[in-house]
């Protein structure tokens, strides 16, 4: 499977070992930690995570996927977008993403999320993907809605890296692509 996607502005690709320093720097930005505290890690933990990402690329199927992609702009890593089974939500496959604070509000993450959803539908033939968004995370809510996810309900979820359940909007997008 080809893990190189090109959009109008971005290259979305498989992670490589050389991405550890840049990814770690992004993961430890305050606006990432606020919404995804489990991504706040040491450089060594980031290296191990990237090794895990690399090991998962050949294993992806319609039912089990743990695919994380690097988002590049002009050759620089600016964020991450991925799909993966979300244990906290009946093991459904979720799209997750973040972008460096320096590149927010420019449409890049929406572009990347849309491209990865299309890729997953085309290549893995998934029936649908989900997104969960904390109700006060307005930027993320805008991203999934711009990518045509539909809000289904609000759920109480104990998210990874958290110690208490919180309300999340639960979204879905269905695969309407032709075979």
Image: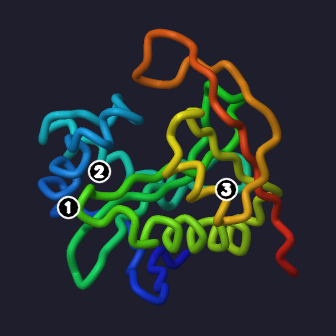
Q: Residue at the spot x=25%, y=68% of the render?
A: 77
Q: Residue at the spot x=63%, y=30% of the render?
A: 168
Q: Residue at the spot x=38%, y=67% of the render?
A: 14
Q: Quadrant of residue 69?
A: bottom left
Q: Earlier in the sequence, mark 1 or mark 2?
A: 1
Is 17 above or below relative to 179? above
Q: Earlier in the sequence, mark 1 or mark 3?
A: 1
Within 10 angstroms of label 2, few (less than 14), some, or many (20 or more) residues? Answer: many
Q: Position of residue 15 (x, y in %)?
A: 32, 63
Is 14 above or below relative to 33? below
Give me the C-alpha separation between circle 3 and circle 2.
19 Å
Q: Which residue is mark 1?
A: 19
Q: Position of residue 86 (x, y in %)?
A: 60, 35
Is 78 above or below relative to 129? below
Q: What kind of element bears circle 3?
A: loop
Marks 1 and 2 in Cβ contact (< 8 Å): yes
Q: Which of the labelled discs sits on residue 50, or is there none?
A: 2
Q: What kind of element bears circle 1?
A: helix
Q: Which residue is mark 3?
A: 61
Seen from the viewer's position, the closer of residues 156 and 105 is: 105
């Amino acid at each position: 499977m080809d893990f190189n996607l090109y959009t109008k502005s971005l290259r979305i690709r498989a992670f490589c070992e050389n991405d550890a320093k840049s990814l770690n720097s992004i993961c430890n930005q305050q606006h990432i930690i606020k919404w995804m505290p489990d991504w706040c890690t040491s450089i060594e933990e980031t290296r191990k995570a990237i090794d895990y990402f690399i090991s998962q690329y050949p294993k992806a199927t319609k039912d089990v996927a743990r695919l994380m992609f690097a988002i590049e702009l002009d050759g620089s890593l600016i964020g991450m977008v991925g799909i993966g089974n979300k244990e906290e939500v009946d093991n459904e496959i979720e799209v997750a993403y973040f972008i460096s604070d320096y590149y927010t509000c420019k449409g890049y993450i929406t572009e990347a999320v849309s491209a990865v959803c299309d890729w997953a539908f085309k290549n893995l033939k998934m029936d649908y993907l989900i997104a969960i968004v904390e109700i006060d995370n307005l930027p993320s809510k805008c991203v999934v809605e711009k990518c045509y996810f539909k809000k289904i309900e609000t759920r109480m979820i104990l998210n990874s890296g958290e110690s208490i359940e919180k309300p999340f909007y639960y979204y879905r997008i269905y695969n309407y692509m032709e075979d």
